[in-house]
Image (cartoon, helix red, strand yellow):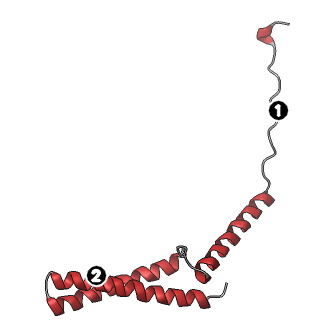
Amino acid sequence: MDMSTSLPPPVPSGPNPPNAGDQTRSTISSRTSDATYNILADKIGGVPNLRKKDNLYQAVVVGVFLIIGMIVGWFVQGWPEGIMLGAVGGLIVGVILSGVVLMVLGFVRKS
């Protein structure tokens, strides 16, 4: 038989493709790992909170306190020192108060 007319050997089949059951299990395990992470973040702390809604609320509260601090600083000491000091004070107060509220909500939040 001539080498130019011979057919190559058949390609062996690879591993079986994952079935739908495997995908469902990985989705469920990732959901439970997210829930476990959120419980850990709420009850124990020391890790960042990944809940988008909580982070959005905290950003809004800090922004409001920033603006309030700037307005108070403007009336107390004027431009630019008063506004800058008021902004820093508003940021500090906003972060502390919103963090305390989120911490309390995390403790009482049901899983």
> Which numbered disc covers residue 88?
2
* Percent coordinates x, y for residue 55 in the rendering: 48, 78
Residue shown at 44%/87% (left/top)? 98
Q: How busy is the neighbourhood of tag 2: few (under 14 within 10 Å), some, or many (20 plus)?
A: some
Check disc 1 and report its element: helix, strand or loop: loop
Q: Amino acid at mark 2?
A: Val
* Percent coordinates x, y for residue 78 in the rendering: 14, 87
Q: CA distance from mark 2 to mark 1?
A: 67 Å
Residue 61 appears in the figure: no
Residue shown at 78%/52% (left/top)? 18
Q: Amino acid at mark 1?
A: Pro
Left or right of 34? Residue 53 is left
Of the two numbered discs 2 and 1 in the rendering, the one whose residue sits closer to the viewer: 2
Residue shown at 57%/86% (left/top)? 106
- Say which quarter of the image contains residue 7: top right
- Say which quarter of the image contains residue 29: bottom right
Check disc 2 and report its element: helix, strand or loop: helix
- Say which quarter of the image contains residue 66: bottom left
Q: Quadrant of the C terminus?
A: bottom right
Residue shown at 79%/11% (left/top)? 5
Left or right of 54? Residue 1 is right
Left or right of 76? Residue 95 is right
- Label 1 belongs to which residue? 12
